[in-house]
Image (cartoon, coloured by chain):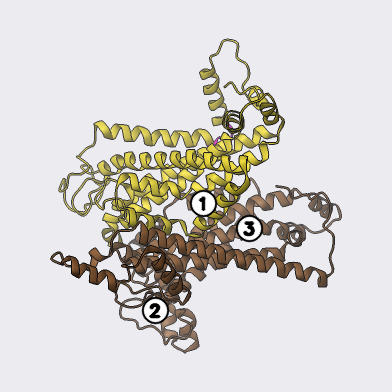
Chain colours: A yellow, B brown
Amino acid sequence: MTTSLDPAVEITAPKPARLSRVAAAVLGAIRSFRSSSGTLPIGLSLLAFLVLISLVSLIWTPYPPTATGTGAFSSAPSGAHWFGTDAVGSDVFSRTISAGRTDVFYTVTAVAIALVIGSAWGALAGFFGGWFETVTLRLLEVVQAFPALLMALLVISILGPGTFNVILVVAILPLPDFVRLARAEVLTKKTWQFAEAARMVGNPPLVVLFKHLMPNSWRPLLAYASISAAWVCGNIAALGFIGVGIQPDAVEWGSMIARGESDVVAGAWWEALFPGLGVLVLAIGCQLVGDGIAARNRGEQR
Amino acid sequence: MAVEISAPPPRSLHGIAVPKVANVIGRRILGAILVIWGVVTLTFLLTRVFGGDPVNLFAQPTATLADREAIRQRLGLADPIPVQYVNYLRDVIHGNLGTSYLTFRPVTSDLLTRVPATAELATYALIFGVVVGVTVGVLSAVFEGSIFDRAVRVFTSAGLALPQFWVALMLIVIFFDQLHVLPGPTGRLPIGVLPPPKVTGFYLIDSIITGHLSILLPALRQLILPVLVLGYGVASPLARGARASMILALKADYVRTARALGLSRARIWFVYAFRNAILPVITMFAGTVAWTFSGTVLIEGVFGWPGVGQYALNALENSDFPAIQGFVLYASILYVIIYQLLDIAYTFADPRIRS
């Protein structure tokens, strides 16, 4: 926390004489946990829970997640199979917790790519303006005219399956929003006094942009990144469900639901319920964290 | 949210304002054409330039180079890319989207036969979603902080986070498998029921117009679950948007003035605040239309609904590029048109934008 330019930081963080900053942060988290609007800690707990489960699945699962015939086919949840088994006799519990790794990893990577590339692009467009900005805005309009999922399906059907392609495609979807947001942020802040001051002491434009402007704009971008992560993980599950890009038998929540689809319609609800809950926890967690950051930003602006 | 404007816009007489409105519409149409051209070009680039070689789909493994060349000629892929591009543009303008590799019929007619199914589903879902979303959003703003408001927040958060295909499956489990009150995912009609004679293509309307009332109830029952799922997806963002903008409106000075003047609560809420709060929601609606298009692809898949979404899914599974291309074009163009229409409507609804 070296951004002393931001007056709000000093107000919210009481200057602890002896407490370390970490302890202060923990205290702050507990305090906001108690307050009714503590969406941030709840969201963080949900995400931490998922990460924990994913880590556990690395060293222990009741059955190997890819093994078939571990029990009767499509059997209901029981003591031997907590979440039941699917159509080929795989253990749904083992698969559900292992799939967390895939979905969390895909989501985080895709959002990170979109955040970095989108913000840099939007910041440059907003800062320099001119033809670059015009072309960017027109391009965004065209890309956003495609309904998002269709865009993903089209691109993935061309690129072919594969981890990297899936991540790339789901990263393209929220990218335009990051470009717009970063552009708007830079556009409003580039005339503020701190930016003018940075310019006046002779900093080159790119230094002004990335060292002085962007550090003051990252919080709305981060809030949006978290909110869009909820959407991204839904899209990943959708790709897995359709079986485009992600291999049909992949240990992934959407693919698991697809494998169970015909059984589910016949009544084997456990094959879809648990992987779906995985998506739900990830999405709600991301959304709450995003809402929490956004609320905190608003609170500090007041 | 710059709701408070610094100076009231100059009032123009109706006759003077009209040219400006025409101007706005003209610019919108031009913009829409440009975007559609961009969409067509991008689709072309993605499928023809970066896509795989469609000849592989047709050629036998034993095909000689000459055979392959013949196929390439027949598909019109032997020409240089710019020539292909011009041909493609000409075809699209004439409504020719190519021939499906799968059904061997023109993609345009394939799509047209399937549009009514999707249109019926999407229309009811949008109506349901808008009515429920706006009502619930406005009420939760009026009763901000109440249990109702909290419940709405939970439901709308879930609506934004839940994968729709999963909600669909869970509803099928509950209402079809467990409670046996609604039919299973067999498409627009139960197995064995014949559709009504085609007038509008909407089964509910057609069965009433043509007097085949025995079809009305089965068709309606088939619609309930998919409309509910899609409508939930529409209602959630709208409810959140309506709530946020209604809360802002209720805090505005003119509401305080109206209250001071002793106007009834209902009048303040639903006439003064609501009218101002609804404008941003209209903009959001355009976004939910796109959401619904994306949603129909998966929902039609789950419910066996014989619409364009299911057609696109089939095409994807079989690398039927002309069909995929055609579907993406159809959806994006429809989206652009709806978006621009809404924008024009918005211009009419909000006099501040016109000037």
- Marks 3 & 2, CB-CB < 8 Å contact: no
Q: Name the residue carrying label 2.
A: B109
Closer to the observer: label 1 or label 2?
2
Answer whether residue A216 is visible to the viewer in this image: yes
Look at label 2 and name its amino acid: Ser
Parent chain of label 1: B
How many numbered markers are drawn? 3
Q: Could you tell me which secondary element the residue under label 1 belongs to?
A: helix
Pinpoint residue A94: horizontal percent, then vertical percent.
25, 41
Is B227 situated above or below B254?
A: below
Q: Name the residue rendered at 67%, 40% in the picture.
A: A188
Q: Residues within 10 Å of mark 2 (few under 14, many from 20)?
A: some
Is B147 situated above or below A50?
A: below
**Magenta residues (range):** A35-39
Distance from the alpha carbon under mark 3 to that under mark 1: 19 Å
Pinpoint residue B106: horizontal percent, then vertical percent.
36, 77
What numbered label is drawn on residue B281?
A: 3
Closest to the observer, A146 or B2: A146
Q: Name the residue carrying label 1.
A: B155
Parent chain of label 2: B
Q: Could you tell me which secondary element the residue under label 2 belongs to?
A: helix
Distance from the alpha carbon under mark 1 to that under mark 2: 40 Å
Judge from the rendering whether residue B144 lies leftward or rightward of residue A107; answer left or right. Answer: right
Answer whether residue B169 is visible to the viewer in this image: no
